[in-house]
Image (cartoon, grey):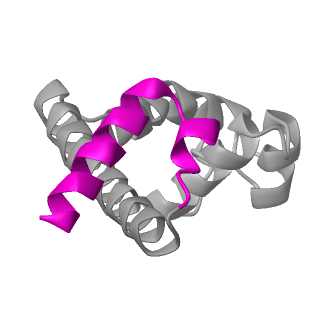
Amino acid sequence: METPKNGSCRKKQYQKISFDLKLSIIDEIANGQTSVNHAANKYNIPRSSIEYWIKKLSNFENKSNTMSKNQEIKKLKERIEELEFVKDFQQDVIADFENVTGEHLSKKYLPEALVKEIEKKRKDLTR
């Protein structure tokens, strides 16, 4: 290896790596698809740089994926409302079926709490 004539060392120039590429490299390493050494060779990037990105950017991914407690509570309340609507609809269908056929299959196959709710809905339908 030749040294420059003026005697000063020149720093090796590396290509600029986009933020998206950094995240994809970190993701490959985190998922076990590749190792740090293999990624360094594949993308011609120093291992120390990749290790630095892992240290700095893995926290970035974790923060972007987390929800605040209020957002999570709101999402869960919406899901509860959806499920209650589905439950009411299913109970209406069962009650209507029992009125039409005259068979009370809910007593055989469903828990008592649901049977009582269905009977109440069936009585409301006959009024």
Q: Could you say where residue 67 lies in the image, as x and y percent from the top left?
A: 26, 35
Q: Residue at x 32, y 45 (%)?
A: 119
* Residue stretch in magenta: 103-127
Instruction: Report the number of numbered marks.
Output: 0
Residue 46 visible in the picture: yes
Residue 95 to residue 9: above or below: below
In the rendered structure, does residue 30 fall within the stretch colored magenta?
Answer: no
Would residue 66 be found to the left or right of residue 106 on screen? left
Would residue 42 be found to the left or right of residue 126 on screen? right
Q: Could you say where residue 91 lies in the image, as x and y percent from the top left?
A: 37, 55
Residue 73 to residue 5: above or below: above
Q: Residue furthest bottom?
A: 100
Would residue 46 be found to the left or right of residue 125 on screen? right
Q: Residue at x 35, y 51 (%)?
A: 87
Toward which corner of the image does residue 88 lie, by quadrant?
bottom left
Q: Could you say where residue 84 lies in the image, as x and y percent from the top left?
A: 27, 47
Residue 60 visible in the picture: no
Residue 70 to residue 5: above or below: above
